[in-house]
Image: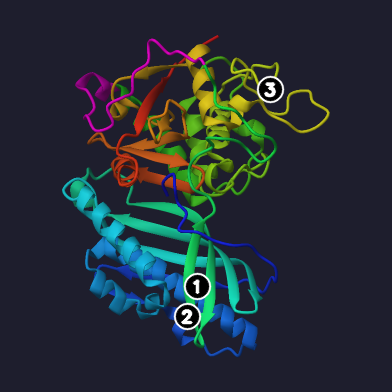
Amino acid sequence: MIKHGIISLGSSLLILSSLTVFTDVKAQGNQNPRNNRTETYSPLENLEIKLVNIAEAVIRAEKDVLVNGNPDAAIRRNPRAVMARGATFQRRLQRAQELRSRLAGRSGYIGFKTYLEVINFEVMENTAILEAEEKTVFDYDLSQDSSDAPTNTESHIKHRFTFILSNGEWELTEDELLNTPGSRRGIPEEPIEPLIDKEYPNITPADPLAPSTPSNESKVDSFIVGYSSLKDVAQLKTIETSSETDLIAQSSSLDRSAIVQYIYYYALTPNPSYRNFEKSGTRGGDCTNFVSQALKAGGWPSEQGWYRSPSNWWYDFSTVTAGQSWTWINADYFFDFIYNRPRARTINRVADLIPGDVISVDFDNDSVIDHTMLVSTKSNSGEIYLAYHTNNTLDKKFYDFYNQVALENPNARYYAWSLLSSYN
C-alpha cells in the first residue's frame, strides 16, 4: 500500500467470465470453500482457476504472517504459495514479519478475510496475465484500543499478476499493484509539474506519533455524538443511492457530518458522478480527488479560474469539456491551495485531528507532497483512523499506516490539517 507498490509486471487481452474466490482466515485456521466446488470448467477456465489459486495463496500467506507471525505455518496453510518466485515471495513474508513487529504493543490484527475478483485474464504462449482486485478485511485486536474503536479495516487493491510456464508448471513471477498511493508527478490527462519556489514559513511537519493533547478531548467527544449515526447508516448501506446535492452543504460553514457521511459512502466504492484518476505508480492517483469530493460535500465552495493556478479549486466549472483544477486532483497543488486560502490550519500533532480533517504526506522528504488522506473516525482513546483512495481504504489505523510507510520511507513527513469551521 505504500508509495512503491510494484513487485513488477505486464498487460492484458482475453476476458473470461468473472470469478470470485473467498477465503476467511482466523488466527487458528484457514479454509477455502472453493475447494468444495464440483462444476465443470473449460481448459482455459481451469487454468484461470489454477492461477487465481496461486495468486490468492501468495496474498493469503502474506496476510497470515501479519496476523500470526509464523511464515512456515502460513506456507503450510497456503501451499500453493510456493509457486511464486522464491526470492520475491520470501521478501514479502519478511516485510509482513517486520510490520507485525513494528505494530506490536500498540496495534495488531486477530484475523482477516480476503477474496479476489477477476477483472481480466489472458494467455500468450508461455505467459499468462491475471488482473484481479483484492478485497481484504482485517479484524483489529480490540484489546489494544477502547471499545468504541472500529472493529476492522477494509482495503481494495488491484493487482496485475504475471505467470510464466516453466518445465510444465506455472510460476508467479511478478505482482504489480495497480493502485498504490500517490499523485506525485502527474495525472492521466496531462503531466503536472511539482510546484517550484514555494515557501511555507509557518508550516512544520506534525509529530505523527505523539498522543493527543488534553485540550483536544472535549472537541472530539462533542463531535462523536454527531457523526457516529451517519457512519452506521453509511456502512449498512440502508440508503442505496443519494443525489450529489444531498451530500453538499451550500454555505461557507463546515459540515463535518457531511464529510464523514461522504467518506463512508465512497471510500471503498468511488462515486460514479466523478471521474476516477486511479493509476499505477507515479502516473497519478485518486487520493486528492476523493479528498476534494468529500470537502465539497462538507461545504467547501469552488474557487474558479485558470486550472493550473494553485489559488483555484474546482471541478467542471462552466467548461465545454470536462475538466478540473490541478488543486482538485494533485496532492502537491492541493497542499498549496489549502495553505494559501485558508480553510484549515496546520497543527503539531496528527493525533489532535478529528473526523473530517486532512493529512498530507511527503513520502520521500523531497518537499513534494505525494498523498492526501482523510480522518474517518477517532476512538475515545485518541487513536485516529484513515480513509483514502489509491488504494481504496477505510478505517485504517494511522499507527498501522505510519509503520507500513516507515518500512520503505523512514523519513516521510506528515502535515496535519485541522479544518476551520468557517472561512471566506
Which percent across, then down, holds residue 414? 36, 29
Does the magenta run of residues contain 204?
yes
The residue lying at 55 percent from left, 37 percent from top is 290
Residue of label 3: 307
418 shown above or below 9: above
The residue lying at 51 percent from left, 19 percent from top is 336
9 shown above or below 416: below
Instruction: In the displayed orientation, state which residue is furthest to the right.
Output: 320
Depth check: give the residue in front, 399 or 80: 80
- Asked if the residues shown at circle 2 and circle 1 are in contact, with their CB atoms under 8 angstroms apart, the answer is yes
Q: Tag on residue 376?
A: none
Of callouts 3 and 2, which one flags the residue occurring earlier in the amino acid sequence?
2
Q: Main secondary structure of the magenta part?
A: loop
Q: Tag on residue 21?
A: 1
Which percent across, then down, holds residue 124? 66, 75
Which percent across, then down, holds residue 388? 47, 41
> Residue flagged by tag 1: what amino acid is it?
Val
| Residue 322 placement, left or right of 396 | right
In the rendered image, the quadrant that contains the C terminus is: top right
Does the magenta run of residues contain 253?
no
Of callouts 3 and 1, which one flags the residue occurring earlier in the amino acid sequence?
1
Please give the range of residues in magenta: 197-218
- Asked if the residues shown at circle 3 and circle 2 are in contact, with their CB atoms under 8 angstroms apart, the answer is no
The residue lying at 28 percent from left, 64 percent from top is 65
- Quadrant of residue 137 in the image? bottom left
163 shown above or below 219: below
Instruction: In the displayed orientation, state which residue is furthest to the left.
Output: 105
Q: What whole-number distance in Å separates the C-alpha atoms at marks 3 and 1?
A: 43 Å
> Residue flagged by tag 2: what amino acid is it?
Arg
Mark 3, mark 1: which one is toward the viewer?
3
> Residue flagged by tag 3: what amino acid is it?
Tyr
